[in-house]
Image (spheres, helix red, strand yellow):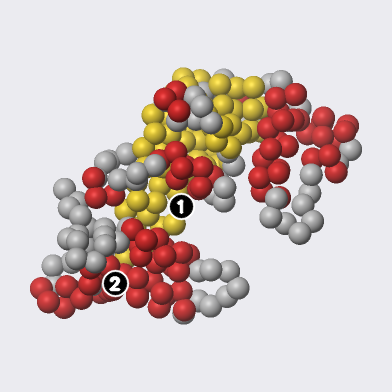
Amino acid sequence: MHRVPAFDVADPVALLAELLGTTPATLVTRGADGLTSTILPLLLEPGGHDGLGTLVGHVARGNPVVRDGHGGEALVVVTGVEGYVSPSWYPSKAEHGRAVPTWDYVTVEAAGSLVLHDDPAWLLHLVTRLTERHEAARAAPWAVADAPDGFIAAQLRGIVGVEVPIARLAAKAKLSQNRPAADVAGVVAGLRAEAAARPGTVVAPADALADAVERAAPPPGHPARSSE
C-alpha cells in the first residue's frame, strides 16, 4: 500500500476489526499457477505478532487455495466506504480550475503466512463464531445448533479453514483530508445530493462516504493535510 501521511489511520487493528464486522475480505494467495483471489468473511482474533492479531475463515475444499496447495505469504484486503469525487464539487474549481476527479476510500491490508486447517473441531468452532457474529443483531438469529448434527458434519467436510497470523498491517483512509475546508464541505454536499437522488430504506453508499469525510476533516482553522 502506498503510504501518504495525510491519510494515515491511527489504529489499523481497530479499523480492521470494524470493517470485518460488516464487510467480506479479499484473500490473495499464490500457487503453482500464480495468484488467486477469494472473497470471504473473516474473524480477527487478538494476540499474534506484535499484537496485530490473526485472521481466520474458511474456503470450499474445491478452492484453488486448497486444491493446488497454496502456501507462503498471503495478502488480505478489506475495503470500507468508497466512492467517486467530482471536481465540480470543489468551490476552488470555480476560482482557478486546477482540479481533477479522485476516489475517496477506506481500506486495510494485512499480510502473513497462510495456514490451512482440516480439523473438524477447529472448523466447527470457527463457523459457530462466524455465525454468531453475523446473526447476533437479527430478531430470530439462526445458530449452527439449529441444524442436524449429521448435516453440519457433512458441511464441515466440504470446507477447509484458513488462518493468517498478521505480520504486516497497513491502513489508509483517503477522505479528502488534503483539500481546503471549503472543498471538503463541497464533497460532503455533493455526496449528500447523490444520496438524496437515490432514496431508499438503506443508507446510500454516498451518504456513508459523506459521513466518513466529515469525521476525517481537519478541525476548523487547521490547514488541509499535505498529500505529499
- At 24% across and 50% down in the image, what residue appears? 6
Residue 31 disc label: none
Q: Position of residue 126 (x, y in %)?
A: 68, 32
Q: Is residue 167 above or below residue 176?
A: above
- Secondary structure beneath dot 2 equals helix
Q: Nearer the viewer, residue 210 or 69?
A: 210
| The N terminus sits in image quarter | top left
Residue in the image at 51% along x and 47% along y: 18
Q: Is residue 138 left or right of residue 96?
A: right
Is 106 rendered above or below residue 169? below
Q: Circle 2 sits on which residue?
A: 185
Q: Is residue 156 left or right of residue 68?
A: right
Three-letter residue code for mark 2: Ala
Residue at 41 percent across and 58 percent down: it is: 82
Residue 100 in sight from this viewpoint: no
* Residue at figure coordinates x 51%, y 27% from the top left: 47
Neighbor class of circle 2 (other Cα within 10 Å; few <14, some 14-19, many 20+) is: many
Q: What is the quadrant of residue 87 in the picture?
A: bottom left
Q: What x and y, as percent, mark residue 43? A: 58, 37
Where in the figure is residue 16, as x and y percent of width and height?
Answer: 47, 42
Specify the quadrant of the image occupied by residue 63: top right
Q: CA distance from mark 1 to mark 2?
A: 21 Å
Viewer-side residue, 87 vs 189: 189
Judge left or right: residue 124 versus residue 38.
right
In primary-sequence order, the first of circles 1 and 2 is 1
Q: From the viewer's perspective, is the residue at label 1 or at label 2 nearer?
A: 2
User: Which label sits on residue 80?
Assistant: 1
Q: From this viewpoint, is residue 188 visible?
A: yes
Amino acid type assigned to the residue bearing label 1 in the image: Gly
